[in-house]
Amino acid sequence: MSTAGPSGSPGSVIAAALRALAIANEAPRGAGPGLATWRWTMRQRVAAVRDALCAEPGRSDVADDGWLAARGGTAFRERNALLMRLGELGSRVIEDADVGAVRAEVARLVADVGHHVQRVHDLAYDRVEMELGGSE
């Protein structure tokens, strides 16, 4: 996954949490105790992704100039929407009888969070490029 940053950075924490969630989502599960264990593991992995997103720099870290401010605001709103989805998914993995639908939603969420993290990285890169005067 291309969302990794330096070890201990918010990007690497999110990447590790997303990897763990994706692996748990793909793990085989059985009926009965196996399903209960899978549900609990998924709940823990969803919480880890949520915590990693909460640790992401917030809206106040976005530069106040032009198009970067607009993109930063969009990333902030996107993060909040992802946090809401993660909150809803946390209870669904425990309670929802349709495990296939839950697995599909988790897979979609992993992809969406990965795209969000990439957009945040792109925004940070553009901010640094703007400060240094661009590539020309």
Image: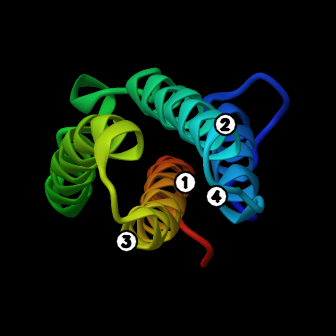
Q: Secondary structure at mark 2?
A: helix
Q: Earlier in the sequence, mark 2 or mark 4?
A: 4
Give SS at disc 4: helix
Which of the labelled discs sits on residue 101, or is there none?
3
Residue at (85% x, 29% y) in the render: 7
Residue beneath the point at 64% across and 48% down: 21
Whether the residues at callouts 2 and 3 have beta carbons within 8 Å, the answer is no
| Three-letter amino acid code at the position of disc 3 | Ala
The nearer-to-camera label among 1 and 3 is 3
Residue topped by disc 2: 33
Q: Nearer the viewer, mark 2 or mark 3?
A: 2
**Image marks 2 and 4: residues in contact by CB distance under 8 Å:** no
Residue count near mark 1 (Cα–Cα under 10 Å), binned few <14, some 14–19, many ≥20: some
* In this view, 5 is above or below 55: below
Dot 4: few (<14), some (14–19), or many (≥20) neighbours within 10 Å?
Answer: many
Judged left or right of residue 71, residue 11 is right
Judge depth for marks 1 and 4 and give the one in front: 4
Task: Name the element at disc 3.
Answer: helix
Instruction: Farthest residue to the front: give it.
Output: 32
Proximity of marks 1 and 2: CB atoms separated by less than 8 Å: no
Residue lying at 19% horizontally and 63% vertically, measured from the top left = 67
38 or 26, nearer to the observer: 38
Left or right side of 87 for 41: right
Q: Residue at x 26, y 35 (%)?
A: 87
**Mark 1 → mark 4, Cα distance in angstroms:** 25 Å
Q: Quadrant of the N terminus?
A: bottom right
> Which one is earlier in the sequence, the residue at label 1 or at label 3?
3
**Label 4 or label 3, whichever comes before in sequence order:** 4
The residue labelled by disc 1 is: 121
10 Å crowding of disc 2: few (<14), some (14-19), many (20+): few
Instruction: Give the amino acid type for the residue marked by disc 1 in the picture.
Output: His
Where's residue 133, x and y in %? Answer: 52, 59
